[in-house]
Amino acid sequence: MIRIRLHTVDGVLTALESEGHAVRTGAGDSPACAVVSTLLQGLGQALVHRAGYTVDGSAPEPGRFSLSVSNVESAERGRLAGLTDLLVRQLKFVAREYPEDLQCTITEE
């Protein structure tokens, strides 16, 4: 089971933690695991190569990923809100399709 906790403020990602794997007995990784891995890797790549905010993240071992975003300049809020919206929509879709593989908790301030 993959467990994701995502926190947003005014529609902009501020923190994300992901733990676990979704493994199917006898079938290897589940499609949910592949999608979540791709989403989180893409998000990390999209965030680290830009100025206008501070990003801190780690992936200390397989199945663990954390990320925080702070000090967001107003010029970057729209871009970050778009990335956040895409991420939230995709995670909700995967959680609906594979409820046994993904638990996603989203808190909004």
Image (spheres, rainbow, N blue to C red):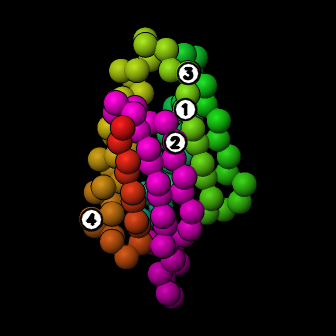
| Disc with the residue nearer the chain's start (1 vs 4) | 1
The amino acid on which the numbered mark 4 sits, given as a three-letter code, is Arg
Label 1 with label 4: CB-CB less than 8 Å: no
Q: What is the number of the mark on residue 69?
A: 1
Looking at the image, is mark 1 or mark 4 nearer the viewer? 1
Compare marks 2 and 4 and give the one earlier in the sequence: 2
Query: What residue is disc 4 on?
Result: 96
Disc 3 and disc 1: Cα gap in Å? 7 Å
Figure check: 63 above or below 109: below
Residue tagged by mark 2?
A: 15
Residue 83 visible in image: no
**Which residue is at 43% across, 13% downward?**
74
Disc 1 to disc 2, C-alpha distance = 6 Å
Q: How far is the residue under mark 2 from the one under mark 4? A: 22 Å
Secondary structure state at the residue bearing disc 2: strand
| First along the sequence among labels 3 and 2 | 2
Confirm or deny contact between disc 3 and disc 2 (CB under 8 A).
Answer: no
Which percent across, then down, holds residue 40?
Answer: 51, 48
Query: In the drawing, does residue 32 fall left or right of residue 64?
Result: left
The front one of 103 and 46 is 103
Whether the residues at callouts 1 and 2 have beta carbons within 8 Å, the answer is: yes
